[in-house]
Amino acid sequence: MRRALLKAGKRWLILGHRWLGIATGLLFALWIGSGLVMLSVPFPALTEAERLARLPPMAWEHVAVPPDAALAAAALPEPPRSFGLEMRGDEPVYRIVAADGRRVTVSARTGALPGPVGPDLALRLAGGVPGRAGVEIVARDQWTVTARYDPLRPFHKVMLEDPAGTELYVSQVTGETALDTTRFERGWNWVGAVVHWVYLTPLRARAGLWRDVVLWLSGIAALSAFSGLVLGIWRLRLRRRYPHGTVTPYRGVSRWHHLFGLAGGLGLTTFIVSGWLSMNPNRWFASASPPAALLAAQAGPAGPVGLDALALARLAGPDAAALRFTRLGGRWLVVALTPEGPRVAEPAGGPDEAEIVAASTAAMPGAPPPQVEHLGAYDLYWYPHGDAPPLPVLRLRFADPAATWLHVDPRTGEILSRLDRSGRANRWLFSALHRLDLPVLIHHPDAREAAQWLLNLLAGVIALTGIVLGWRRLSRPRAVRAGGFRES
């Protein structure tokens, strides 16, 4: 009975891997190839540094409306989620994000709420030259498909017709530049992130459906990879070898599929499983982005800013591209956004550690005061990947049920990330396995990229040999495919 069960299990393992491999082989090849492209060309995004660099110098002589008057003009029922002062073309404006995500723009010169942005104004805001740049209205396209752009839709897509083929997306609602792309980015992303993330616009626009599709695709692919790894180890003989002294019973392409599967199968399996986990099945992992409720609780009650318009230029200094007004425990801070990073410009000075800890503790009801850790260098949970997060930072370790850590900018008191127990698990189950953010590699980006190339090339051979075997299987006459069971 035991031998019969073992034989039946082995048979179903082989058949399962064979047909799962046929169903998912092309997916493996596409994911591997597109992942290699993404190592060099990420999905288009407008970074904060790029956004600030595009802003004209502040025209302080035109700032006549104080911050409190701008908030009154916005008429928000709750304190704003975000509040700042910057230029919109040649006019200074207050940018306000309401608690519900709605965007409000208030003129800092007149206190009025400007109307929708038309094509001519969008062209000027983007720095385009009339007659040498095109403008078209876009509600949603391949590069603005995600929900984060919803409050800014629709867009004027301004095509600058420069050598790089730059296209800027200017919000019709606020006049903000929300995204820039180049011909190079768009071309490579069609074979990079669009393929890797299954970012087809009609599908990705329906977030729930897209998530379900990717979960099922990657889940089935994970079963295919895992069954192949188990089968490959099962069929390996290092001591009692097969005839002619071989460690594998297979010949030809099957032999290469088996041997490369042994060499790269573990890496391929962890890539696919961690990719499945990145979709957060069953909502197992909390996001590292601080939730709005936490940020609002740390900000505290909203009193008046209490500054007149003339004081803003003096507080900002000559290097500020924009101002941001934030609250910490109910106290307003004026933060100057400069090329070197944010700088608190509030007259009473920036927050001290005790103030930051008190405000953050108030945002964690029921939790005792945290253990405070000063990070002057990157470690296993605060490290660069593509971007370089600021240093130094404060790590506040709370003894709440979720064992929450908050990473806080000591200059401004801003919560930069939130990691609870599930988030730290995700750091190892996804970031370590999928992006190779391993202790020996996170501080050596060149070595990490070399390891990613090696593992992906091994996985690529597995996928391509599997596609060849699957094609041969499907190309056989139906009577042969339906015939007796063969292990090879």
Image: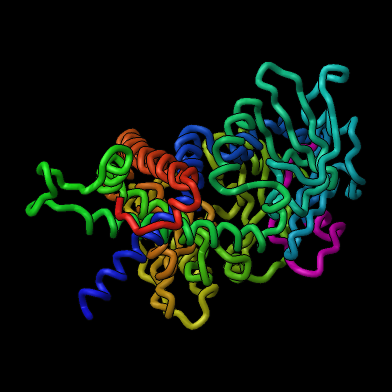
Q: Would residue 412 appear left or right of 330 to someone viewing this image?
A: left
Against 245, residue 275 (above or below) is below
Would residue 406 be visible to someone looking at this image?
yes
Q: Would residue 154 appear left or right of 198 to someone viewing this image?
A: right
Quadrant position of residue 36: top left
Boundaries of the magenta span: 68-88
Residue 269 x %, y %: 36, 54
Q: Residue at x 41, y 47 (%)?
A: 391
Q: Residue at x 39, y 51 (%)?
A: 271
- Quarter of the picture containing the N terminus is bottom left
Against 233, residue 343 (above or below) is above
Residue 100 x %, y %: 75, 64
Quadrant position of residue 305: bottom right
User: Closest to the observer: 132 or 373?
Assistant: 132
Q: Residue at x 52, y 33 (%)?
A: 41
Q: Residue furthest left?
A: 239
Q: Would residue 60 appear left or right of 189 to someone viewing this image?
A: right
Q: Magenta stretch: residue 331 in it?
A: no
User: Closest to the observer: 327 or 4?
Assistant: 4
Against 224, residue 446 (above or below) is above
Q: Magenta stretch: residue 71 in it?
A: yes
Residue 74 x %, y %: 84, 58
Residue 392 x %, y %: 40, 49
Q: Residue furthest front?
A: 479
Q: Residue at x 40, y 47 (%)?
A: 435
